Image (spheres, grey):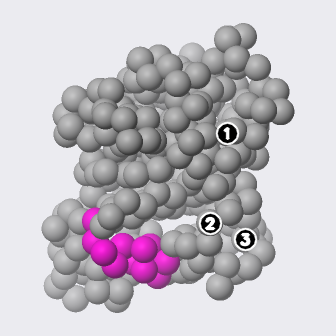
Amino acid sequence: MQATVKLVTVFIVFLTVAIPSAAQPPSSVLEESCDPRLQKGLADCLTSLRLNTAAERKALSIALVDITDPSAPRHAYINPNEMMYAASLPKIAILLGAFERIKNGEMDLDETTRDKLTQMIRNSSNQAATEMLNRVGKGYLAGLLQSPQYRLYDPDRNGGLWVGKEYSKSGAWRRDPLHNLSHGATVLQVARFYYMLENGQLVSPESSRQMKSILAQPAINHKFVKGLKTQHPDSRIYRKSGTWGPYHADSAIIEHDGRRYIAVALAKSPQGGRWLCDLIVAMDSLIFETGPSLQ
């Protein structure tokens, strides 16, 4: 019980994720404290899964955002601003960069481009990711992630999404300024990416819809997908994961039985894949147990 209380106390944070007014840029957000029931429930989940020590060591970071009512999201976080190597998860940033190029008329969303983007996301193809990164432009993408429009890499929040290297054996182009990572993320900034996506605030409402369709039907059955499909095979999952050595990452918008939520987790452990598989089952139950009535 003491460990649970400690986690609740230590990890309750203030976060910016809400729908902006028309006068605000897309990445502007309202300050909201974490939902107390959801935050306590997430801490209890870690205790029951014996993952509270990993969280205290900052080897595990989690974002859980109930967006069933998008005008009143409920948040819970563990180590929200802890930057970690995220392997293939930051390929979602390349997806964003491609659609910005498409919007500007600098790239066509033809059959070949859509197929490459789909392979990059659903199958996590490194070859497709490297090709698309070079088409988007490494410097262009780095600037976009740090732009006032998105602030998906924000030094004031200890970093965020970063793609500083091709997904190949070539050396890094530019590692992130704060942590020297080639492919990095924080759960906060990944959650913001999905929140803006869900609200049509990435590039445009139509581009957000197109990006979400590419994130659908994940082809790799592990971590979040494995856990959810065991318990809720009819779940709709819009997802990108990542794995390299002891680093395990997963992120998704999940929809089933009238609820919709964002889940993001980053782990550093040889057992990280199993952690994430177990965590998503617990977090899914938590969303339903703590959410307001759907009636």
Check residue 275 for magenta coloring.
yes
**Front one among 275 and 200:** 275
Measure how far apart labels 3 and 2 are at the Cα level: 15 Å
- Which tag is nearer the camera, tag 3 or tag 2? 2
Q: Please state if 69 lies on the left or on the right of 130 as rendered.
A: right
* Vertical placement of residue 168 versus 141, above or below: below
Q: Please state if 172 lies on the left or on the right of 64 as rendered.
A: left
Kind of residue at disc 3? Ser
Q: Secondary structure at mark 2?
A: loop
The disc label shown at residue 235, or none: 3
* x 66%, y 26%: residue: 99
For the C terminus, which image quadrant?
Answer: bottom right
The disc label shown at residue 7, or none: none
The magenta region covers 268-279
Q: Which quarter of the picture shows residue 16?
A: top left
Counting residues from the N terminus, which is met first, the one under dot 3 or under dot 2?
2
Can residue 56 be seen in the rendering of this structure?
yes
Measure how far apart labels 3 and 1 are at the Cα level: 23 Å
Check residue 59 for magenta coloring.
no
Q: Secondary structure at mark 3?
A: loop
Kind of residue at disc 2? Ile
The disc label shown at residue 220, or none: 2
- Which tag is nearer the camera, tag 3 or tag 1? 1
Find out whether the residues at labels 3 and 2 contact each other: C-beta distance under 8 Å: no
Counting residues from the N terminus, which is met first, the one under dot 2 or under dot 1?
1
Tell me the crowding category of disc 1: few under 14, some 14 to 19, or many 20 or more residues within 10 angstroms, Cα based: many
The x and y percentages for residue 151 are: 41, 28
Q: Which residue in the structure is indicated by mark 1?
A: 117
- The residue most toward the front is 169
* x 67%, y 11%: residue: 106
Find out whether the residues at labels 3 and 1 contact each other: C-beta distance under 8 Å: no
* Vertical placement of residue 154 versus 63, above or below: above
